[in-house]
Amino acid sequence: MRYITFVAYPQGGGINRLDRRVNELDLEYRATHRMELLDDDTVAMFAEGRGDIAGLRDLLEASPEVVEFSLSGDDSGFFSYTRYGADELTRLLLEDRRKSSSLMDMPVEHTDDGGLRVTYIGTEAAFTEAVSNQPDGVRIEVERTGPYTPTSRHVISQLTDRQREVLSAATDLGYYQEPRNTTYKDIAEATGLSETTVGEHLRKIEAIVFSSLQIR
């Protein structure tokens, strides 16, 4: 098993119109942990960042392509869930990912010079396919490649299985939406835990996440 890491530079300063506007906020750290193209032609994205959370909230509220969003945290570190209308380039990138035999290793990191740092896992042939199939309007610079060894650099990988289960249930039930759509009791029923245990897990999860953001 091998990996290749490259930085993609979309023309115009961002992968889509929304991303270009977010880039103008000059957030200190951004990483996308999950991004999916949904059946209704919207993109659901789970990300983390550090910086002007109030400015980001105002931008998302004013953006016509944003269907819904939720922010949790403050300027020192936050999580964001955003669902927005897909544009042509985003749609093409995500559809190509479905067809590729290589796997994208999350998170995708936003570099200081406007690029997206992406790592693919797979075979040499799969890497050639992944890089050569990038759409027009994206410049690719390969950073490194070699045997793949999993690391603990990802925030989600630092959580225990139980913590991931609680986080998944909390997210699915709307705990991080605005306004909050669920309670400890609902999450406890979904996971078979007590409300006290759910609260303890969520506090530990948030401590891990925000600690990771602050040391970058």
Image: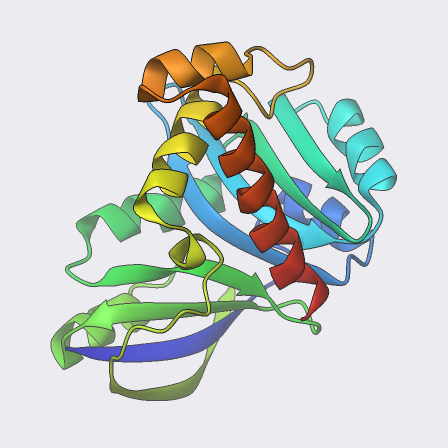
Please tell me which residue is depicted at 47% across the width and 40% down the height of the picture: 88
The residue lying at 72 percent from left, 63 percent from top is 214
Q: Is residue 41 left or right of residue 46?
A: left
Occupied quadrant, residue 6:
bottom left
| Residue 13 appears in view | no
Residue 213 image offset from top left, x and y in percent? 66, 60
Relative to 134, is 63 on the left or the right? right
| Residue 63, image x, y percentages | 73, 27
Counting from the top left corner in percent of width and height, residue 143 is at 45, 86
Residue 73 seen from this side: yes
* Image quarter of the C terminus: bottom right
Q: Taking 86 as reference, is 169 left or right?
A: left
Q: Tell me the colour scheme of the image.
A: rainbow
Asked whether 190 or 181 is in front, the reply is 190
Kindly indicate the quadrant of the structure image that contains residue 193.
top left
Looking at the picture, tell me which residue is in the foreground, 164 or 29.
164
Q: Residue at x 86, y 40 (%)?
A: 55
What residue is drawn where x is 43% and y is 42%? 35
In-front residue for pair 36/195: 195
The correct choice, above or below, for 70 with respect to 20 in the image is: above
Task: Please indicate whether residue 58 sits to the left or right of residue 93 in the image.
Answer: right
Q: Position of residue 38 (x, y in %)?
A: 36, 27
Residue situated in front as seen by the camera: 55 or 89: 55
Is 1 rendered above or below residue 143?
Answer: above
